[in-house]
Image: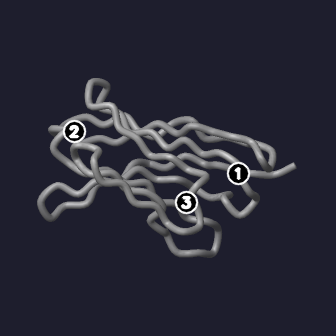
Amino acid sequence: VQLVESGGGLVQPGGSLRLSCAASGFSFSSYAMSWYRQAPGKERELIASISSAGGRINYADSVKGRFTISKDSAKNTVYLQMDILKPEDTAVYYCYTRIILTAYWGQGTQVTVSS
């Protein structure tokens, strides 16, 4: 199983970024996917999740209305569209899935929101 995030970077407040997580090594369409983030000095937090078929989506209150999670099973990729970014969104963003009892994480991608 491999999860590889991309798309992070430096953006000004109010701007947008789209993160991608390319998955391989498992049946992507059969499993839920999630995005977590971890800011300096803080615990890792769940910010968005999407069910295997994409019918159930949940967001943390801190990102609801600004972030959108989606998955493309044809490309084995999960996305996180981030709009109206705020300085407090600065963090390392991680892709996550759990297969049976094993958790898998990507290496993370840094998002910095600053003027």
Nearer the observer: mark 1 or 3; the answer is: 3
The numbered mark, 1 or 2, whose residue comes first in the sequence reads 2
- Label 1, label 3: how many angstroms apart (C-alpha)? 12 Å
The numbered mark, 1 or 3, whose residue comes first in the sequence reads 3
Residue 75 higher or lower than 40, as above or below: above
Q: Residue sitting at 74 percent across and 42 percent down?
A: 15
Mark identifier at residue 57: none
- Label 1, label 2: how many angstroms apart (C-alpha)? 29 Å
Nearer the observer: mark 3 or 2; the answer is: 3
Q: Residue furthest left?
A: 100
Asked if the residue under mark 2 is in contact with the one under mark 3, i.e. CB atoms within 8 Å, the reply is no
Q: Residue sitting at 49 percent across and 49 percent down?
A: 108
**Residue 110 coordinates in the image, percent (x, y):** 61, 49
The three-letter amino acid code for the residue at tag 1 is Leu
Q: Is residue 61 left or right of residue 32?
A: right
Q: Is residue 7 left or right of residue 49?
A: right
Q: Secondary structure at mark 1?
A: loop
Q: Is residue 30 left or right of residue 21?
A: left
Q: Nearer the viewer, residue 102 or 55?
A: 55
Which residue is denoted by mark 3 in the rendering? 64
Residue 46 higher or lower than 76, as above or below: below
Mark identifier at residue 28: 2
Q: Residue sitting at 30 percent across and 37 percent down?
A: 23
Which part of the image, by quadrant, shows the N terminus? Answer: top left
Q: Residue sitting at 33 percent across and 31 percent down?
A: 72
**Residue 31 coordinates in the image, percent (x, y):** 20, 48
Q: Secondary structure at mark 2?
A: helix
Which residue is denoted by mark 1 in the rendering? 85
Nearer the observer: mark 1 or 2; the answer is: 1
The three-letter amino acid code for the residue at tag 3 is Lys
Q: Is residue 19 left or right of residue 78?
A: right
**Residue 48 coordinates in the image, percent (x, y):** 44, 57
